[in-house]
Amino acid sequence: MTDKAATRQRVLGIDVSCHRVTLYDEATGRTHDIANDIDSLHDALAGYTGHALAVCEATGGHEDTLLAALHVLGIPAHRADAAKVKAYIRSFGKRAKTDAIDARWLARYALDRGATLPRWQPPVPAQAELAALVARRLDLVAIKTQESNRLKAPRSDLVAEHIRAHLDQLAEHIARLDARIAALVADQPDLAQRAQALRSVPGIGPVLAPLLLATLPELGTLGRRQAASLAGCAPHPRDSGTRARPRHPAGGRRQIRPALFIAAMAAARGTNPLADFYRRLVATGKPKRLALAAVMRKIVTIANARLRDLPHPASQLT
């Protein structure tokens, strides 16, 4: 046995579903089905404390119990991006899918990339609640937009009545979420300080500030290009040979870009340095759409700099 094999870290690939998890132990080659509850997970994983790395996928919250159990047991874990894992599997030309197969692929992914995978850390409670509230608000706003579009051609008076009632209900729920989000931010000194810094950037208002706090908590610790890329407003090259194609923003966290576009329009219509920047671009022949995209990047990079320059918070989130 080589030294590398002897010192190789033990890895666990764990496929998560609503009611159970499928664990694959790469060292023994065994697969185990475990109920997705804290007691069952604690009993099954206790033997791996101190000498294993566990990798699971983000599954919309079903993985929370597993990650909590791993944290209590002191087992380092990585919550993988499902799209990255899928691309990794397809790079081998494989398409078969069962829970056991997925668990084995997660273990192999951990073996290949374990040294560079960031370890999961439990979220600060206030940050986790803010993320949940903002995510729910985004869901309700999307549903409201769908219902508003349906109301333009309801094809029935009764359907139109139902849609209007639903829209009123959605507006009430969104208002309650806005009030709760504002209260949560105000009650936490660190969040309040960061929100105030964000609100000082032209275009960032009471909706976008908590959205950035919830969906881009790394803001303030990133380089300007990385911040723009995570926000989905960095142009990426698509050149090939001698052909230079136009560069378009792509990727990033999809929740942020629509709100940033609205913020850029608001900033461009105001009296501020970003509005002057927008008008200069348009005056030089830049299409308005591209000029607004440049303003979006400016908003993100300025916000990142404002948060980076904040003094150390007086207190931590609780």
Image: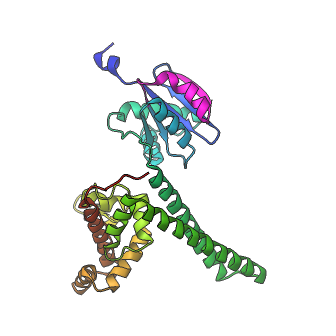
Colour scheme in use: rainbow
Query: Residue reaching furthest right?
Result: 158
| Left-right relation of 151 to 299 | right
Which residue is farthest top?
A: 1
Magenta stretch: give its range.
30-53
Out of 311 and 224, give the one closest to the viewer: 311
Q: Is residue 261 above or below residue 88?
A: below
The percent coordinates of residue 161 (x first, y second) are 74, 81
| Location of residue 281 by image quarter | bottom left
Percent of width and height locating residue 26: 47, 24
* Residue at screen point 73% across, 77% down: 162
The question of residue 158 being in magenta is answered with no
Q: Is residue 253 visible?
A: no
Q: Is residue 33 magenta?
A: yes
Which sits in the foreground, 289 or 76? Answer: 76
Q: Quadrant of residue 265?
A: bottom left
Residue 185 place in picture, x, y as percent: 44, 63
Query: Does the rendering let one see residue 183?
Result: yes
Q: Is residue 1 above or below residue 45?
A: above
- 22 versus 51 height, above or below: below
